[in-house]
Amino acid sequence: MSETRTNPRKDARWAWALTGSGHFFVESLALIASLDPVDLFVSKAAEEVLRMYRQELPEHLRIYHDLSASAVPVGRFYEGRYHTLVVSPASANTVAKCVYGIADSLVTNCFAQAGKCRVPSIVFACDTSPEMITMAPRGPVPVYPRAIDLENTDRLSRFEYCTVVETIGALEQAVAARKVELAAGTPADG
Ligand SMILES: Cc1cc2nc3c(=O)[nH]c(=O)nc-3n(C[C@H](O)[C@H](O)[C@H](O)COP(=O)(O)O)c2cc1C
């Protein structure tokens, strides 16, 4: 059978999906600003969390909101318009759905359709250790991810075409490594 991978166009962009996790939410927004060109896909929960953290989406970007049951904008992955998907921060909810192949929202559809188009994903999963400190709107709070949350993060890390990172530093490194691959014209493999 011939190669059926959806080849990215020459003008392919980064796709960045924001979920409603407050964990390194502000830092993720800062990293988005360092990418060009990039389109944003924003979950309904992320729209609310943005307001709670008193953040705003960058104005100059193309932004897709979660407005349709069938996640219409995600068709863009099938047109080769994206070379990479970043999901950051990724809530425990979104990670769980992705692990089980559920695609019932804009962001879970981005992940599912990117996988089906063999577009590599980088996912910054929030629940990575049994005891963590996270930034709530009013300051840092302790959080104790459950076994199921940790198991889901681990399972996602074994998905094809998917790199799971657990710290903001690792996210920065994964994005930098992908930039190098793209500059060299090297496709990421599964
Ligand atoms: C201020 C705030 C911070 C939140 N932080 C987290 C978080 O760090 N991790 C997480 O998994 N969920 C967090 N949530 C809960 C998610 O927003 C919620 O599970 C939501 O359903 C996720 O939807 P999404 O995955 O479609 O974006 C937070 C909610 C609020 C209001």
Image (cartoon, rainbow, N blue to C red):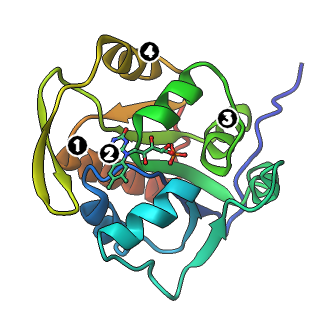
Secondary structure beneath label 1: helix
Q: Is residue 190 visible?
A: no
Q: Position of residue 102 (x, y in %)?
A: 67, 27
| Vertical position of residue 3 compared to residue 62: above or below | above
Nearer the observer, 5 or 110: 110
Q: In the image, what residue occupies the spot 22% across and 62% down?
A: 137
Q: Position of residue 4 (x, y in %)?
A: 83, 32
Secondary structure beneath label 3: helix
The answer to whether mark 4 and mark 3 are in CB contact below 8 A is: no
Tell me if 68 is positioned left or right of 133 in this view.
Answer: right
Q: Position of residue 129 (x, y in %)?
A: 18, 24
- Residue that mark 3 sits on: 112
| Vertical position of residue 98 compared to residue 108: above or below | above
| Vertical position of residue 25 compared to residue 84: above or below | below
Nearer the observer, 143 or 119: 143
Q: Earlier in the sequence, mark 4 or mark 2?
A: 4
Indicate which disc residue 174 carries: 2
Tell me if 23 is positioned left or right of 72 in this view.
Answer: left
- Residue that mark 1 sits on: 170
